């Protein structure tokens, strides 16, 4: 049986998943391709539009959710997709999906980028340093390298 926090690549039977957020994610991904959660490195085989939809969904989980389990599911999802493609497509998805003037969303994005890519982290830190909002500047300074 799979316990809370299964990682992509692990064998997953969504009927045995304990965590309802993870089960919902697995079931949603199975609509695109059965077993996709454990094969997110193959997401581009679904086509660019579907891959971007999935990236946006993981980005939303990672940066907009208030539930830590959902945030971690989103991060694991993003980090399990083909990383060169994620690095290339994340900025456009961020622009469409997130409100970077919102402290919560901005800080969660920095946490994701810290795990993902140093150049993306620097890009979003620089953006935050220029913000008119003190809490955004504070978050940016926390991640400044």
Image: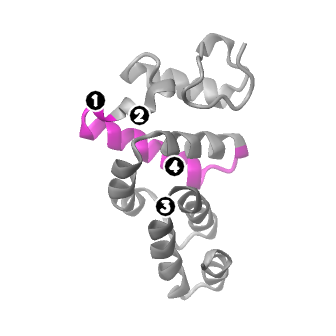
The answer to whether the residue labelled 3 contacts the one labelled 4, judged by CB atoms less than 8 Å apart, is no
Residue 63 falls inside the magenta stretch: yes
C-alpha separation, residue under disc 3 versus residue under disc 4: 18 Å
Q: Earlier in the sequence, mark 4 or mark 1?
A: 1
Q: Which residues are magenta?
A: 44-68
Of marks 4 and 1, the one in the foreground: 1
- Compare marks 3 and 4 and give the one earlier in the sequence: 4
Q: Which residue was labeled with disc 3? A: 117
Q: The C terminus appears in which quarter of the rendering?
A: bottom right
Question: What percent of the width, then of the height, locates residue 46?
Answer: 29, 29
Between the residue at mark 4 and the residue at mark 1, the CA separation in whole angstroms equals 22 Å
Q: Residues within 10 Å of mark 3 (few under 14, many from 20)?
A: some
Is 101 placed above or below 27 here? Answer: below
Reply above or below: 144 against 46.
below
- Tell whether 49 sits left or right of 130: left
Number of the front mark, 2 or 4:
2
Q: Say which element carries label 2.
A: helix
Residue located at (57% from left, 69% from top): 102
State the SS at label 3: loop
Magenta stretch prevailing secondary structure: helix
x then y, percent, for residue 120: 45, 67
User: Residue at point 51% right, 49% down?
Assistant: 60
User: How far is mark 2 from mark 4, CA to CA?
Assistant: 19 Å
Quickly name the residue at label 2.
Answer: 41
The residue where tag 1 is placed is 45
Q: Are marks 3 and 1 in contact (CB under 8 Å)?
A: no
C-alpha distance separating marks 1 and 2: 9 Å
Mark 4 Cα within 10 Å, few/some/many (few <14, many 20+)?
many
Element carrying mark 1 = helix
């Amino acid at each position: 049986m799979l316990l809370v926090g299964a990682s992509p690549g692990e064998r997953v039977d969504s009927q045995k998943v304990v965590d309802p957020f993870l089960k919902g994610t697995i079931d949603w991904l199975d609509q695109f391709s059965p077993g996709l959660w454990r094969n997110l490195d193959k997401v581009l085989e679904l086509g660019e539009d579907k891959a971007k939809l999935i990236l946006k969904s993981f980005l939303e989980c990672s940066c907009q959710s208030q539930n830590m389990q959902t945030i971690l599911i989103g991060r694991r999802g993003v980090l399990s997709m083909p990383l060169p493609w994620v690095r290339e497509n994340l900025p456009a998805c961020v622009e469409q999906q997130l409100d970077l003037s919102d402290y919560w969303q901005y800080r969660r994005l920095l946490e994701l980028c810290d795990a993902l890519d140093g150049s993306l982290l620097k890009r979003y830190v620089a953006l935050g340093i220029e913000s008119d909002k003190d809490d955004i500047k504070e978050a940016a300074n926390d991640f400044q390298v």
